[in-house]
Amino acid sequence: MKYFESKYGYFTDGGKEYVITNPKTPRPWVNVISNGDYSIIASHTGSGYSWRGNAGQNRITRLYQDLIKDNWGKYIYIRDVESGEYWSAAWKPVMSNYQHYEVVHGIGYTIYKHKVNDIYSEMKVYVSVDAPVEFMHLTFRNDGDRVRKIDVTSFFEWVLGNFPDEHREFHKLFIDPSFKSNTIFVRKYLGQFPDEKGRWNNTDWDHVAFHSVNIPVKSFTCDKESFIGMYADERNPIAMTLPKLDSKCDRFGDASASLQVELTLEPGEEKEVVFTIGAAKIGEEDAEQLASEYTNIQRAKEEFSKVKDFWTELLEKELVETPDIGLNIMTNYWARYQAISGRIWAKSGYYQVSAGYGFRDQLQDSQIFLSLNPELAKKQILLHAAHQFQEGDVLHWWFTIRGGGPRTHCSDDLLWLPFITQEYIKETLDYSILDEIVPFVDGGNATLYEHCKRAIEKAFKRFSPRGLPLIGENDWNDGMNAVGTEWKGESIWLAHFMYLLLKEFITTIEMKNDVTFAKKCKDTMETLRDSVNKFAWDGEWFIRATKDNGEKVGSKENDEGFIFLNAQTWAVISDITDEERKKMAMESVKKYLLRDYGALLLYPAYTKPRSDIGYITRYAPGLRENGGVYTHAATWAVWAYALIRDAEAVYKSYKGICPPYRSYDIDNYWAEPYVTCGNSDGPISPYYGRGGWTWYTGSAQWLHRVATHWILGIRPNYGYLDIDPVIPSDWEGFTYKRFFGDTLYVITVKNPNKVSHGVKEIIFDGQKVQRVPILTDGKSHTVEVTLG
Ligand code: GLC
């Protein structure tokens, strides 16, 4: 069954796979595949690269960001030995005419199916679930009626660590390749980190990389010039005009890796070849052993099934089935896969190479684990807590290899720690997380509760005389980085956020009997509520901030940027204001911000750089945070509309950013229809609706969360399951299946009276109940809900 078919492809296998049938998609449509340690990006043309641990700090193969070429990869060439004609296993790099081309992006793998000159090839690309090894598992079939002899040749370039491309001439001097039993090994004698005495440029890269093939090679080379030739390129490398590779392997060229094997195929015959690439940590793993253990057909097959099983088992802990196939596909598979594989594990996308974790970013992302494996959420929370200073503030982001990062004057990042911790407790009831002892980044340690408290106490010190939080260098919107650098300007969004945080976290504070602190928090809540309603209401919506000089941002007094989304959505989400203002604010969102492709972050976009506001105004008008749809924030509109029960707006704001729906105007969207984009262009851009910066975006987790928690309305709430859907009234119902540990809940919601919200009756295991308890008895429970 095909879903959301466009001229470039469609979803299949219940939405688990996306098939691309036309290699000329508007932009590279990629897969970010990771096992949490070793990662690769595979584009639909066959380009991409590999890294271990960190895409910036520990890259294995080379990719240089060129936005219109997509021409770096780990390529496989196929050559008819008799005629000399050659092509590639993926469309790139040779880009030949084909009889068939199809790319399947799946959860944890990509498959390239190509047929040229009657040779059908299938190349599965994936990463072992628990070893630093990637596979290119090829199957060839002779679809012609004569015997064919082909050779198969790999080619890619090494990076090996943190290797700025503009200094390749320098760095190549340290690379040392060698060849042994079908395998190229490669070391680099310059690591990017200092030795134990703090001295630079005198250590080795701490890995050995390898590239191997499962059958004896005909020839090989470790030299880029031998393969490509001085005045040729990947599309027509000199090596494809020579009978074999020159088997050169020394330290005096520009290191690359190519292995060549030869096959004879009878008509109808099929043969398989397995190539691997990997990197072994010196002193912990053995490259030779990894290469020999993993580079064979049986192991490759086993590893592929392990990949599929791993993801199925993880993701199918929670499944929804609604009349909206786009919502099902994103909620069940792609949004979670994107958040886990792309954001938390690979930490990179095609458009943004990250060298670290953002303090607030992966904390929010970690909520994706709550319904799948809460232990992983806990691990992430504790990791972030360990990047807090004793004073309560945090590293805005940090390098994931060897740490270190900027200590900024950002005003909100620290508060996400108690916020997400509380969400974790609300969903798991695991209060023991609060007693975990976690170090501070500047020494000493304390319980997680203390970490959370210090974050809040630090934020309490940053208030204006009017009782509003100061924005500092920036709040959630990093690019509003000039509004309040003198610590005078205020953030209204932060006031909303803090209000909600305190409202939620007070449960924990009271449970801890922390009486004085509880009082302080309650008083602050009151102050926040009073001040926001007194100073931040602008008549029809809330202003976004005030500048150091007291002028308003996001107010009708402004010509540009007169309304901001977050200041409205979070006023509702936090419950800081009365119903009338909530409704008015969200009506203003409808009037100015909610468009066909989701809610804009602000309106109208800034058309000139504003040194008093910050770099959001320096983006081209309509792009990213400057008046585009910033998908992360656009998901919060779904949440806010659900709270005010505006079902039509809920659905409109969701569908606009639900990627499969963009298949219908795909040439306008450009981006992958199976993962969320970081942003899409706002109406002022000539490319209104164009998606950008896919994969590496915090919107994936939130898109999943607003679908389950706020559209389907199923929310674990301290041991109970709140059920409160806000759905299109023409839905006949939906089902939601989810495990809590080993206890299964199957929830069926029926909508006989065609309403959009309002629960009439709940039957839990055959008994009518007011609330559904979350049991952990290892059994299976049914919940039947009737709306009306
Ligand atoms: C980027 C940052 C994120 C921030 C957002 C809005 O995505 O990583 O932390 O909240 O921009 O500016």
Image (spheres, rainbow, N blue to C red):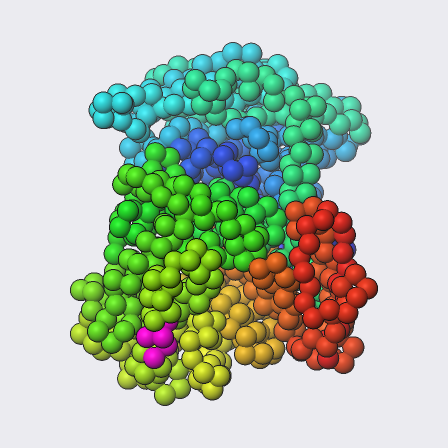
- Residue nearest the observer in this picture, 623 or 586: 586
* Residue for point 45% across, 51% down: 363
Q: Is residue 114 visible?
A: no
Looking at the rendering, the stretch of residues picked out in magenta corresponds to 525-530
- Residue nearest the observer in this picture, 116 or 533: 533
Residue 594, compared with residue 61, is above or below; it is below
* Residue for point 54% across, 79% down: 644
Residue 388, compared with residue 183, is above or below; it is below
Q: Main secondary structure of the magenta part?
A: helix
* Residue for point 21% across, 73% down: 465
Residue 431, compared with residue 202, is above or below; it is below
What is the total number of numbered labels drawn onto the structure image? 0
Q: x, y (%) of residue 149? A: 69, 22
Q: Is residue 636 visible?
A: yes
Residue 111, compared with residue 222, is above or below; it is below
Residue 758 falls in image quadrant: bottom right
Residue 289 falls in image quadrant: top right
107 left or right of 621 in image? right
Q: x, y (%) of residue 164? A: 32, 35
440 left or right of 664 in image? left
Q: Magenta stretch: residue 625 in it?
A: no
Q: x, y (%) of residue 640? A: 51, 73
